[in-house]
Image (cartoon, grey):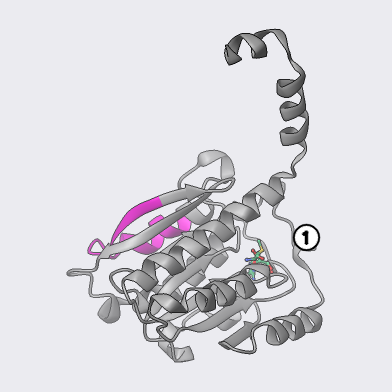
Amino acid sequence: MLIDFFKENFFFQNLAASLISRIPCMVEHNLGKYHVLKKAFYLTALEQLEGDYLEFGVFTGSSFIFSTKVHRSLSYLGGQKTRFFGFDSFSGFGDIHEHDKHPFYLNNIFKVNKDKVIRNIKNKTQKSETRIVEGYFNETLRGKKASDYGIEKARIIFIDCDLKEPAREALAFSLPALQQGTVIVLDDYFSYKGDSTLGVCGALTEVLQGFPGIKLREVCPYGYGGIVFIVSSLEGSNINEKS
Ligand SMILES: C[S@@+](CC[C@H](N)C(=O)[O-])C[C@H]1O[C@@H](n2cnc3c(N)ncnc32)[C@H](O)[C@@H]1O
């Protein structure tokens, strides 16, 4: 029997342990991220959900470009028009709030050659309608709502800016554009040793506090600490009056 063979021969288990333990965590996480972005486009395409794609935290543009490509590759499902908005300072977090301090989320990691990144995004997304909004969120989002950038409905919201403060700005800004069926992808949801008042999880809890009518249903966790929700109901939430 096969099981008897494996009980006597350790070559395959040793090989698997050696190979799998060497796959970089970042690679596995990013594969998970791409997978759920594809899922978000698929689920919303099946529902013919109109609206825009909003990404907060663009960095080198890899997930942003990927999303435009996935949208195009799923056009056979309905092909609703979706515009792509990306928000980033391209210089990291800026001033980091005391409660956002973390050993891994450091400003120097995320400084990129902004012009080169934006040129590459423009080059690789020519067939899509895109807008990159450059600047720290406390300048580009604070006190504003999605409609200030011409965004009326969100199809997919991707929060990938690691810390609580920027995630809160991004979520508060996006709230008025929520609709039933909007998919919200939240990276780094389980950071800060699982403290649900901190990080991206803390931001979501705080932003939703004033809107008990907004109901989210979990779609799936992904990668190394991300999660996906879908807006299942907005009944009685008055998002446009309060936000
Ligand atoms: C993890 S990276 C985004 C990765 C990207 N979504 C991808 O998968 O290719 C986080 C990004 O959030 C941006 N960011 C974080 N805080 C910000 C803030 N307060 N204002 C603007 N951008 C911010 C950083 O500059 C960084 O590029």
Q: Is residue 215 magenta?
A: yes
Point out the image quarter for the N terminus: top right
Vertical placement of 26 versus 240: above or below?
Answer: above
Rendered residue at 78%/69% (across/down): 111
Give percent across and percent down for residue 44: 37, 70
What secondary structure is found at the residue carrying circle 1?
helix
Q: Quadrant of ligand 1?
A: bottom right
Q: Quadrant of residue 120?
A: bottom right
Foreground: 161 or 180? 180
Q: Quadrant of residue 19?
A: top right
Rendered residue at 56%/67% (across/down): 166
Foreground: 240 or 98? 240
The magenta segment is: 202-219
Q: Is residue 155 left or right of residue 28?
A: left
Give percent across and percent down for residue 193: 57, 39
Q: Amino acid at mark 1?
A: Ile
Could you tell me how many numbered marks the image carries?
Answer: 1
Give percent across and percent down for residue 230: 35, 61
Residue 182 appears in view: no
Q: Quadrant of residue 63?
A: bottom right
Q: From this viewpoint, which residue is outermost toward the left?
A: 236
In the picture of the structure, the residue carrying the numbered disc 1 is 109
Give percent across and percent down for residue 48: 33, 77
Point out the image quarter for the C terminus: bottom left
Residue 202 appears in view: yes
Q: Is residue 191 magenta?
A: no
